[in-house]
Amino acid sequence: MKDDLNNWKELYQQKKAKGIDTNALLAGFNKMEKKHRRERIFLTIVFPVTILLLINVMPSISNMYYLGGVILMSMSMLYLLWMIYRNKFSTIEVSQDFTNKAFIENKISKLKNRILLTSRDMWIYAILLVLGINVAYIEALHYFEMPIRILSHAGVSGLMLGGFYFGIKKKLKEYDLEIIPMIEQLESLKAD
């Protein structure tokens, strides 16, 4: 009997309790949503202003290259806005019940979509934006010889894509510290 008690005692001491601080998890969700709300508001204001600025800065909208470039850049910005608004999630009240499996799966899906937005959709945005800039300046660079035109397009494209590469890489590292732990906590709640 004493040996059984000792075995149970050792088993109990070896097993680590899987505790999740739901208040910290909720606070993390709410903090993330406030941050993303500021991003959405900022981008909703900046993108139309950028498009208007592009239209005013471009020498002539009547030129099909300039017009095509502005349309491609506008499409890229609208695509990114659509993806950001599609992936928004609301703040969470402390009184909400965490036992709802659909709720947990929804939050996991939203967090994974946020990572996908950065890892996949930002590249689509970047490519459309770079393509739009290159199309817009075809006419402006036609006065130069072909090697200079190619180097100009390749240089601008390379710089922009390199900037996007490092920006996306940095954001994904932030997500490794911010979003991945939240997903893991939610996955453990779902498993319970």
Image (cartoon, rainbow, N blue to C red):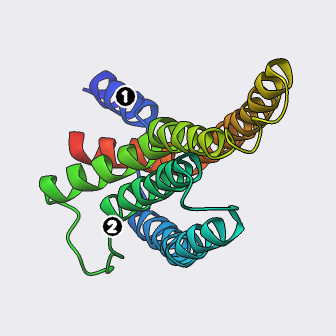
Q: Which mark is residue 23?
A: none
For label 2, the crowd category at 10 Å Cα-Cα, with few meaning under 14, some 14 to 19 and many 20 or more, is some
Name the residue nearer the viewer: 50 or 177. Answer: 50
> In the shown orientation, is residue 158 left or right of residue 148?
left
Q: Quadrant of the C terminus?
A: top left
Say which amino acid is labelled 1.
Leu
Looking at the image, which residue is at 42% across and 40% down? 116
**Quadrant housing residue 131:** top right
Residue matched to label 1: 11
> In the shown orientation, is residue 118 left or right of residue 158?
left
For label 1, the crowd category at 10 Å Cα-Cα, with few meaning under 14, some 14 to 19 and many 20 or more, is few
Q: Position of residue 70 (x, y in %)?
A: 54, 56
Q: Is residue 17 visible?
A: no
Q: Position of residue 123 (x, y in %)?
A: 53, 37
Q: Position of residue 25 (x, y in %)?
A: 44, 63
Name the residue nearer the viewer: 175 or 11. Answer: 175
Measure the C-alpha gap from mark 2 to mark 1: 42 Å
Vertical side of 139 occupied by 70: above or below:
below
Looking at the image, which residue is at 75% across and 35% down? 142
Looking at the image, which residue is at 23% across and 63% down? 98
Residue matched to label 2: 89
Q: Quadrant of the N terminus?
A: top left
Name the residue nearer the viewer: 104 or 128. Answer: 128
Per the image, label 2 sits on a secondary structure element best described as loop
First of labels 2, 1 by sequence position: 1
**Quadrant housing residue 11:** top left
